[in-house]
């Protein structure tokens, strides 16, 4: 795991793994097999914090669903058929509302995966770390969801299959936006632009990664969600590892007098 001091940065900060400036030029390599193996090893060391974080996430999702049922007509959520009969405007509103609520939680759990990639331990409560960048995360989530929905609607009007392909594509090109916001504290527009630019250099890899995410989610649902408690921690750590290797993780060194642990660095 390579590291280098960031130029024009305080000596207490360094970047572990990749380099954002080089990634923006496409100067990074993809090692799929090695990353898959490394993600398994990381998950073995940092499994339970993500499980407890997922439990917190699911509990909050139940609260969100309850709020939606209060704010929207019961007929809309009463059955799958009713959901399919929602107008495009209702569907967009529901997607944006859900994204705005969930974005800080997604940011928190992704940050946990990034920290695991450099072997920094976490706790389940760290899922709420995303609320430290809540405004930027919500803005990023809403903008990417809005763009994705618009393109998917246009594509689906041509063919449902084209709509699915566009869904996969937009998910792939935006997959680094929230990590960039929560880890590098970039503005939403910069994070979205950087994500699009970086992913296009290795687009087949990122589309494949997104496809695996979707397939794992479907498999998890088939098992009534039980398998998700195994798959999601692995996928979160895999995304964190990809982020570390492609973009790098900013690490702040702590003076020994301020360190409360055996290590003296945090992300």
Image (cartoon, rainbow, N blue to C red):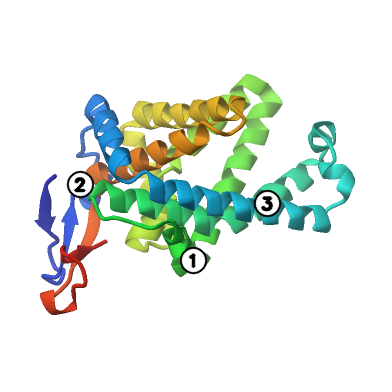
Image quadrant of residue 180?
bottom left
Please determine whether, in this image, residue 170 is positioned above or below residue 64. Answer: above
Please determine whether, in this image, residue 73 is positioned above or below residue 198. Answer: below
Residue that numbered label 2 is attached to: 18
Image quadrant of residue 203?
top left
Residue that numbered label 1 is attached to: 131
Disc 2: CA contacts within 10 A as few (<14), some (14-19) or many (>=20): many
- Disc with the residue nearer the chain's start (1 vs 2): 2
Disc 1: CA contacts within 10 A as few (<14), some (14-19) or many (>=20): some
Q: Secondary structure at mark 2?
A: loop
Please report the residue visible at 83 percent of the width from the left and 31 percent of the height from the top.
81
Disc 1 + disc 2, Cβ < 8 Å: no
Q: Secondary structure at mark 3?
A: helix
Residue 242: give x, y in percent of width and height: 30, 40
Quadrant into which the C terminus falls: bottom left
Foreground of the two, 36 or 155 = 36
Can residue 219 be seen in the rendering of this structure? yes
> Which mark is on residue 62?
3
What is the CA distance from the residue labelled 1 to the residue labelled 2? Answer: 26 Å
Can residue 192 be seen in the rendering of this structure? no
- Disc with the residue nearer the chain's start (3 vs 2): 2
């Amino acid at each position: 795991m390579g590291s280098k001091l960031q130029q024009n940065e305080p000596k207490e900060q360094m970047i572990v793994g990749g380099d954002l400036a080089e990634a923006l030029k496409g100067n990074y390599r993809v090692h799929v097999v090695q990353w898959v193996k490394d993600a398994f090893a990381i998950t073995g060391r940092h499994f339970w914090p993500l499980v407890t974080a997922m439990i917190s996430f699911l509990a909050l999702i139940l609260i969100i669903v309850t709020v939606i049922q209060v704010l929207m007509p019961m007929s809309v959520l009463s059955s799958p058929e009713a959901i399919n009969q929602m107008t495009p405007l209702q569907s967009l509103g529901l997607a944006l509302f859900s994204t705005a609520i969930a974005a800080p939680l997604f940011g928190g759990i992704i940050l946990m995966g990034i920290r695991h990639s450099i072997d920094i331990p976490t706790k389940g409560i760290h899922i709420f770390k995303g609320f430290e960048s809540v405004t930027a995360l919500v803005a990023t989530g809403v903008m990417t969801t809005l763009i994705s929905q618009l393109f998917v609607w246009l594509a689906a009007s041509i063919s449902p299959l084209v709509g699915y392909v566009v869904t996969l594509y937009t998910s792939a090109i935006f997959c680094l936006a929230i990590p960039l916001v929560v880890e590098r504290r970039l503005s939403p527009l910069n994070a979205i632009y950087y994500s699009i630019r970086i992913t296009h250099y290795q687009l087949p890899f990122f589309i494949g990664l997104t496809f695996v995410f979707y397939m794992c989610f479907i498999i998890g649902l088939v098992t009534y969600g039980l398998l998700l408690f195994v798959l999601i921690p692995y996928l979160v750590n895999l995304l964190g590892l990809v982020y570390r290797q492609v973009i790098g993780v900013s690490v702040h060194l702590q003076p020994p007098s301020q360190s409360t642990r055996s290590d003296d660095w945090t992300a």
